[in-house]
Amino acid sequence: MDEPSLIQKLAAEVIGTAFLVFVGVGAVPATIIVNGDAPFTMADLGMISLAFATVVVATVYALGHISGNHINPAVTVGLAVTGQFPWSRVPAYIAAQVLGAIIGAGAILGVLGTAARDAGLGIATYTADVTAIQAFFAEFVGTFILVFTVFGVIHRRAAAGFAGVAIGLVVFAAIIPVAPTTGASINPARTFGPMLVQQIAGGTVTWSQLPVYLAAELFAGVVAALAFVAVSRTRTLPAGNPAPVSAPPMSSATN
């Protein structure tokens, strides 16, 4: 079977991440613009979460066979830590993802104009009422859930054909509880790209928050990857010892 070239894989990562940011992040200023002076509601959060989820599903099926559709440095690093992706390609993949995020954020400005900048361009941020520790924990939890699920659906024993749906659903689900605290970035490229474009466009950016997001998301990617490997590891039964057809015998430690 022919293997896509590295250039093709990187192009797919750029495109996939650009789609993610334009549709998902772009849904935030679009909602604010459409609402006008109306208050932000749970229904609005649901629609934004749905935008992220649907574009993730689409990119998994459209680009997964080319690059794996990581579109998230936390996923890339997690795969590398567990030996499922070469470290030599990690910098190129992350660079492609960041470039895609910048392009996607730029496209939001191109489509919605300066109103998108004035609405915050959908950048992930947390208010003064939220501590850095709380923000770190929120992003860690959201990213952990996402990356752990990714590892589960790409496992060789996972049901075939449902990866895109499962990942899209977990993105939708994770955003709901995390967004009120940090905006639920759960993706270092999605965090940085819109912040850079917002700065270039003359908008307000709290750069001091960036390390909190990046550290939480990348750390969560590593921990989630290692956790999945730990819980999914199987053992080889000794020769002549048949595999159990029901629950294993109770451990002698309970006697």
Image: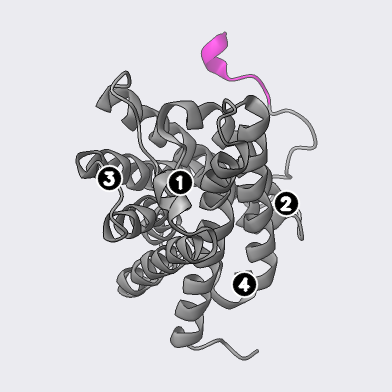
Residue depicted at 49% across the width and 88% down the height: 5
Whether residue 233 is visible to the viewer of this picture, yes or no, is no
Residue depicted at 53% across the width and 73% down the height: 15
Judging by the rendered image, the residue that carries numbered circle 3 is 205
Q: Where is residue 126 in the image (x, y as percent from the top left)?
A: 35, 31
**In terms of sequence position, does the residue under pointer 3 or pointer 1 come before the other?**
1
Q: As drawn, is 27 to the left or to the right of 9?
A: right
For the C terminus, the quadrant is: top right
Q: Distance between the residues labelled 2 and 4?
A: 14 Å
| Residue at the right extreme of this rendering | 245
Taking the magenta stretch, the answer to whether it contains residue 158 is no
Amino acid at circle 1: Gly
Looking at the rendered image, the disc whose residue lies closer to the viewer, 1 or 2, is 1
| Region rendered in magenta | 249-255
Amino acid at circle 3: Val
Check contact, mark 2 vs mark 4: CB within 8 A: no
Q: How far apart are marks 4 and 3 (CA)?
A: 32 Å
| Circle 1: element type | loop
Judging by the rendered image, the residue that carries numbered circle 4 is 63
Judging by the rendered image, the residue that carries numbered circle 1 is 122
For the N terminus, the quadrant is: bottom right
Closer to the camera in the image, 158 or 221:
221
Residue depicted at 33% across the width and 52% down the height: 195
Q: Is residue 197 above or below residue 35?
A: below
